[in-house]
Image (spheres, rainbow, N blue to C red):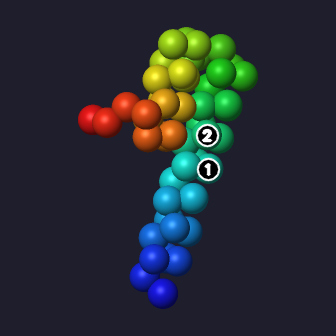
Amino acid sequence: MGKASNDRHLALFAFTVYGLIVFLKALGYMSVELANFLFQIEKGLILL
């Protein structure tokens, strides 16, 4: 039950980040480089 809850929270977080990026790009406030960086973090390609 704990893993399902964690997966749900991670999916909600990823969806929120993705929605924020799309919204800001639509408004023209976010650069392409920043959006690509955030997508890489979301995918786990860049470890902080």
Residue at x-position 45% and y-position 70%: 6
Q: Where does the C terminus fall, quadrant-wise?
A: top left
The residue most toward the front is 45
40 vs 31: above or below: below
Label 1 with label 2: CB-CB less than 8 Å: yes
Residue at x-position 44% and y-position 40%: 44
8 vs 41: above or below: below
Q: In the shown orientation, is residue 24 left or right of residue 48?
A: right
- Is the residue marked by circle 1 packed among few (<14), some (14-19), or many (20+) residues within 10 Å? few
Residue 18 tag number: 2
- Report how far apart the C-alphas of labels 1 and 2 lie in the structure: 5 Å
47 vs 35: above or below: below
* Element carrying mark 1: helix
Residue at x-position 51% and y-position 54%: 13
Q: In the shown orientation, is residue 45 left or right of residue 47?
A: right
Q: Nearer the viewer, residue 45 or 20?
A: 45
Give amino acid for label 1. Phe
The residue most toward the left is 48
Give amino acid for label 2. Tyr
Task: Residue 2: give x, y in percent of width and height.
Answer: 43, 82
Task: Residue 46: give x, y in percent of width and height.
Answer: 37, 31
Task: Residue 10: give x, y in percent of width and height.
Answer: 50, 59
How many numbered marks have been drawn onto this rendered protein structure? 2
Residue 7 tag number: none
Q: Nearer the viewer, residue 24 or 36?
A: 36
Q: Which residue is mark 1?
A: 15
The residue most toward the bottom is 1
Q: Quadrant of residue 32?
A: top right
Residue at x-position 67% and y-position 31%: 23
* Element carrying mark 2: helix
